Amino acid sequence: VRACCSQKASDMVAGSKSALLLGAAAAIGLSEAFSPAPMALSHSRSAALTATPTLRAERSGLAAATMARESFVAGNWKCNPIDVNEARQLATAVVAEAKTAPGQVAIFVPHPYVAMVSDIAKGSNVEVGGQNMYVETQGAYTGATGATMLKSVGATHVLVGHSERRATFGATEELINGQVLKALDEGLKPLLCIGETKEEYESGLNTKVCALQIAKGLRGVTKEQMKHVTIAYEPVWAIGTGLVCDAAVAQDVHASIRSFLAEMFDKEVAGSVRIQYGGSVTPDSVDELMGKPDIDGCLVGGASLDASKFKRIMNYEPFKGKGATPFGGKPGGFREMMWKAMSKVDEEPETVRARSVWQRAGEVRDLETRPRQARWALA
């Protein structure tokens, strides 16, 4: 695709409509590019944008066929806020700010707040999760919370294996595996956290540590159940420290995780499982991270306690990151990217500005004004 677009770049700049269409065809597939009646698309543009889920195209060389993964940004409140009143204010603000988020959003809140936050989030695009659970449904387990208890107060997700649970509370791989299996059995969606320590990272063991944690944490999970599992790569040394793993390094680890999943399950599972990055994610770092093809979302700590910062993270713009891949960008790949660009026509009738499909693809930096029909021909 890149080679084709490079060869056609000069023709594109010159405004050749046929070259533009050919470049688009190379990116989205000839059968889609030449589907009938582009005008029909224009008539239903708003409906299509509203109805089509925002998906992230899988671009690594792993999958035999192109997979699509919806982006997933989650906030982990940890042991915050200090009381129910602050929790109510924060949840209300997050729900309001999440309305424009392009993908899936969830917040993992302390157990005393789950019911209240679930009520606030009802009817919105924000889902709620618990931060931990026990492997038993009920019994003489003082201080424990069962999966059915979380479900009964509105939780749909649960964190499993977070590094703070491993390091501070001594969660073992056996316990974490039991939590994953129990959550799936009870209808909760587990978010399995993995990641290496600073010493392991400096020793070059990050991918091996992650593979081991996945192998143990997902033991006994079926391929069908993997549809409900999300993995979060959180380098322990970056959690709460303000340090962020370099986006290129994070991408390499995510790609290795996906390769390991292909070995453990198959390529279809590996291509469909979403892998988040976590570790001091901020509004300044999210765009570059989300510009990487194997990073499907973020698990956000401290920044999720500030609704304005979390809004910026939820509404990431990966093509603005310095490490964004040429065909990266909003989930959905090239076709939806063009829809998004075309939707700007009403706001900017003279030209499609910084969010232009061709700017984002890295082929034309200064897009000249094009006739509306030529722009719509691409979609």
Image (cartoon, rainbow, N blue to C red):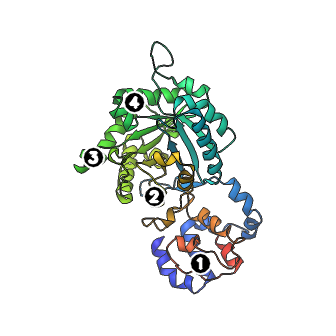
The residue drawn where x is 40% and y is 34% is: 161
Residue receiving disc 1: 20
Question: Which residue was labeled with disc 2?
Answer: 293
Kindly identify the amino acid type of the residue bearing the numbered disc 3: Lys
Give the labeled residue for mark 3. Answer: 198
Asked whether, in this view, residue 110 is left or right of residue 248, the answer is right
Q: Position of residue 41 (x, y in %)?
A: 73, 65
Instruction: Please state which amino acid type lies under the numbered disc 2.
Output: Pro
Mark toward the start of the polypeptide (1 vs 3)? 1
Residue 358 % position (x, y): 56, 74
Task: Choose the circle earlier in sequence order: 3 or 2.
Answer: 3
Going from N to C along the chain, the mark reached first, 4 or 2, is 4
Q: Residues within 10 Å of mark 2 (few under 14, many from 20)?
A: many
Image location (x, y in percent) of residue 3: 45, 74
Residue 127 shows in this picture? yes
Residue that appears at 44% across and 54% down: 294
Q: Where does label 4 land, which residue?
A: 176
Question: Mark 3: few, some, or many residues within 10 Å (few <14, many ≥20)?
Answer: some
